[in-house]
Image (cartoon, rainbow, N blue to C red):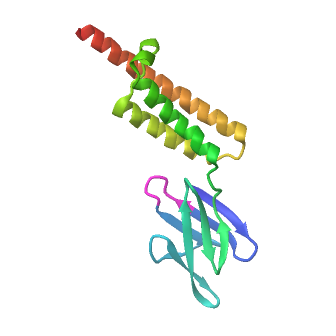
């Protein structure tokens, strides 16, 4: 994921963050900052080297602390984004682990359903972070929820048919 902001003093600041590993690279006016450790980079100014500290991550929002100034590089995750993403996981876990609900519509639960809905939850958050519109975020989350429901429903149906054939 790459985000670029323009700062009045430092110019163009770009952050490249790996979605899976969380490794970060920071560029100020096209020059990559030297990495000192996981969160500290060295900015070479005309006054000498200055530490630049990165706080946060893509999923929580990233900021850069440079010369006592905090510069927001990516927006913070809103509370409703967390709730929408968690809804996918919670719904699949509750429905998939209830015999009465699975009698109505079988959904795979347990570890397999949790893995699928967990992956859907992370995907939903990643896609929602790329847009600013609440309506679009809601639409993205609903689409991913429906796809997850379809996948878990098809797997639940396959498992239910396999169990009924074995009996």
Q: In the rendering, at what x and y percent does residue 117 appear?
A: 46, 34
Compared across the picture, whether 118 is left or right of 133 comes to left
Q: In the rendering, at what x and y percent does residue 26 appear?
A: 56, 69
When asked about the image quadrant of residue 31, the answer is bottom right
Q: Is residue 114 magenta?
A: no
Q: Eyeballing the image, is 51 above or below 134? A: below
Query: Which residue corresponds to the image point at 49% horizontal and 25% vertical from the top-left?
Result: 149
Nearer to us in this view, 158 or 35: 158
Please identify the quadrant where the N terminus is shown: bottom right
Which is the main secondary structure of the residues drawn in magenta? loop
Compared across the picture, whether 152 is left or right of 161 comes to right
When asked about the image quadrant of residue 107, the answer is top left
Q: Eyeballing the image, is 24 above or below 152? A: below
Query: Which residue corresponds to the image point at 54% horizontal and 75% vertical from the top-left?
Result: 33
Boundaries of the magenta span:
16-22
Q: Eyeballing the image, is 71 above or below 90? A: below
Compared across the picture, whether 128 is left or right of 106 comes to right
């Amino acid at each position: 994921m790459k985000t670029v902001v323009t700062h009045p003093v430092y110019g163009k600041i770009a952050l490249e963050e790996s979605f899976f590993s969380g490794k970060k690279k920071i560029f100020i006016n096209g020059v990559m900052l030297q990495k000192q450790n996981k969160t500290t980079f060295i900015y070479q100014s005309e006054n000498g080297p200055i530490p630049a500290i990165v706080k946060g991550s893509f999923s929580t929002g990233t900021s850069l602390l440079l010369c006592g100034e905090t510069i927001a590089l990516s927006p913070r995750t809103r509370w409703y984004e967390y709730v929408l993403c968690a809804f996918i996981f919670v719904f699949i876990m509750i429905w998939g682990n209830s015999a009465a609900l699975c009698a109505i519509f079988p959904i795979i639960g347990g570890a397999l359903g949790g893995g699928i809905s967990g992956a859907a939850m992370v995907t939903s958050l990643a896609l929602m972070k790329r847009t600013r519109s609440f309506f679009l975020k809601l639409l993205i989350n609903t689409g991913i929820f429906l796809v997850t429901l379809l996948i878990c429903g098809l797997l639940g149906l396959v498992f239910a048919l396999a169990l009924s054939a074995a009996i």
